[in-house]
Image (cartoon, helix red, strand yellow):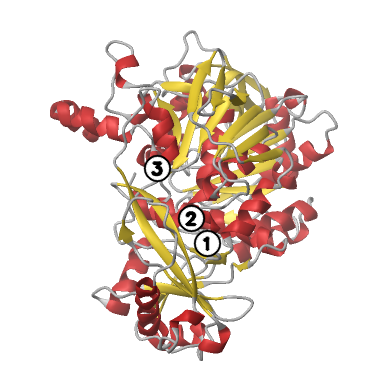
Amino acid sequence: MKTQPIAPARIEFGAGAGEPPRSPDFDDLYHPRIGAAAQALHVFLHGNGLPTRWAARAHFTILETGFGLGNNFLATWDAWRRDPARCERLFFVSVERHPPRHEDLARVHAASPWPDLAAQLLQAWPPLVPNLHPLDFDGGRVQLLLALGDVKRLLPALRLTADAFYLDGFAPARNPDMWQPRLLRTLGRQAAPEATAATWSVAHDVRAALATAGFEVQRASGIGGKREITVARFAPRFTPRGPARAALSPGRSAVVVGAGLAGAAAAQALARLGWAVTVLDRHAEPARETSGNPAGLFHGTVNAADGSHARLFRAAALVAQREYAAAVAGGVPGSAEGLLRLELRDGGLAAMRATLQELGLPADYVQALDAATASQRAGVPVGAPAWFYPGGGWVAPPAWVRHALATPGVQFIGGVAVATVECHGSDWLLRDAGGRTLAQAPIAVLAHAAGAAQALALLGGPSWPLTHSRGQVTRVPAQATDRALWLPLAGDGYALPLPEGGLLCGASHEAAAPDGDDTPREADHLFNLQRLQRLIGQPPPADLSSCQGRVGWRLHSDDRLPIAGAVPLPAAAMPPGQRLDQARLLPRHPGLFVLAALGSRGLTLAPLLGRLVAAQATGTPWPLEQDLVDAVDPGRWMVRAARAASPAQASAVRADGPQPG
């Protein structure tokens, strides 16, 4: 999906205290003069039967078209807080093409009816980049998924089942793109049985489009001088066709295999959704393999094409920033106060600034710095311009893994090696080599790197093109350094300052399968130290024996993207005539998921992809657009093989683009 830069909202503030904000671009008010709170309560909450309809539910999902200034979200959150019979978890998904800048949002809510909630929204407000932004409130029991971009592109790309729809936005005559009948007709593909919808608009085309989508449409009394509003209930005469989805589990227990970054992230995400999670690992303690490195970096990516890789890593980096900043505040060693990445490709600073201009990426996500400014930020001279990621940084993976596994609802069991995974009724049985059952649950997540592929092979599962690389990091003690590096620095290798003093640098990269020899090599230390010298001018110590190191093996796929999601059935088990040319249509093993091949960017990727797997497993809104889910799908090589075998069909699929629903 081709992204477009986000153009923040232009807002004109009324001169009087009761004058609503106005959009000069749409020549319309953001809310009626009776106030945003009155409209939100009467039209959107009461129009959808809330709060009554979410009573005693495990989770309830609202999809809004037009986040605007966030008043509907705040009103709904406030109603949820006040309701003693509220659902366990509230998901609020909202699409907005022109979100307000932070300073404008602060001005709007300076006199908010919900000051505490508005302050939390302001604190969580993300950089305005074209992505989905999952934001957690009330300990994760309220989740706002803010989708920034064109509703025509984003709405078909969202994967959720909505219990209620808030159809908001400027008047159809002022903002026709938001109210296109074709767009409104797609809502039926995202509606739960008995879903409701409400809007202040009573335009004929809006009502007709809802009826075509399968809604029974009625008029209800209006408010604030508007005589009527529209309310609707989803009651289709046939079941809309949608993409293949993993069947929902009847239970709320899960087992995760692997206690590294991937497994810890998946376990944490499931537990935050109220699930009981057992984590198994062959080592007695968690994070004993590559995730045991003393420190690692996380940051986004900038690419002029802004393709799947750049969009995925941008979304992941923003989630990682929020996750690790909270963990660091809780005592996990690390920092989320910025990272520099030297730009060593042709074009230099001019090309960097041109890319930022074209993509419209804001300064709170990334900045292009000349070498002098980058040197000032780093505290050491650097010889090239650099990308500065204000939300990037570093964290200690073993400490974060232990932090994630300490999430209430997670139980860690070490010293057990899973050899087989078998389906038994609606559960998955995980057994050791002797046939002993180690765990049983309706949801199983295989997050033990190459072991996941081996376990799936016994099920007749896919054979993925995976490779290992051996990586060694080097710790330079404080007494052997004369450079006061202030921020993590990446480029030709990386360096980061350790809290106890000294530097960590690395990492070497050698294509090699794990051989059991994790002894650091002097040659790899020298390789790392030579790159450190090129980065910051720090010469290698005369005595390399003063340097400590650690070895790990990274797992990569051939396209350098991770593998995350529901496991597809083997080709031999597919129904006759099953289309294999789109990942979203592949039938799946109910309740079986994989999260692996995070490569050298596991710290950046793990929190977001853990959320993705948890969302797929629990039937809650996915935190990634469908095309990015396709890019990391475990079945993507099956799709490529099918397209290669049928070029004509593959060409037609590419011409049609993503299929809505």
Identify residue for label 1.
293
Q: Is residue 368 left or right of residue 236?
A: left
Q: Nearer the viewer, residue 225 or 384?
A: 384
Q: Which residue is mark 3?
A: 628
The quadrant the N terminus occupies is: top left
In this rendering, is residue 371 above or below 330?
Answer: below
What is the CA distance from the residue labelled 3 to the residue labelled 1? Answer: 29 Å
Q: Is residue 183 left or right of residue 417?
A: left
Q: Measured along the vertical axis of the image, is residue 96 above or below residue 491?
A: above
Name which residue lies at 36% across and 24% down. 586
Image quadrant containing the C terminus: top left
Query: What residue would you read off at disc 2?
Result: 290
Please report contact status of discs 2 and 1: CB closer than 8 Å, yes or no. Answer: yes
Q: In the picture, residue 276 is in which quadrant? A: top right
Q: Secondary structure at mark 2?
A: helix
Residues under labels 3 and 2: Cα distance? 26 Å
Report the amino acid beneath label 1.
Asn
Q: Secondary structure at mark 1?
A: loop
Q: Amino acid at mark 2?
A: Thr
Q: Is the residue marked by circle 2 packed among few (<14), some (14-19), or many (20+) residues within 10 Å? A: many
Q: Position of residue 632 (x, y in %)?
A: 39, 41
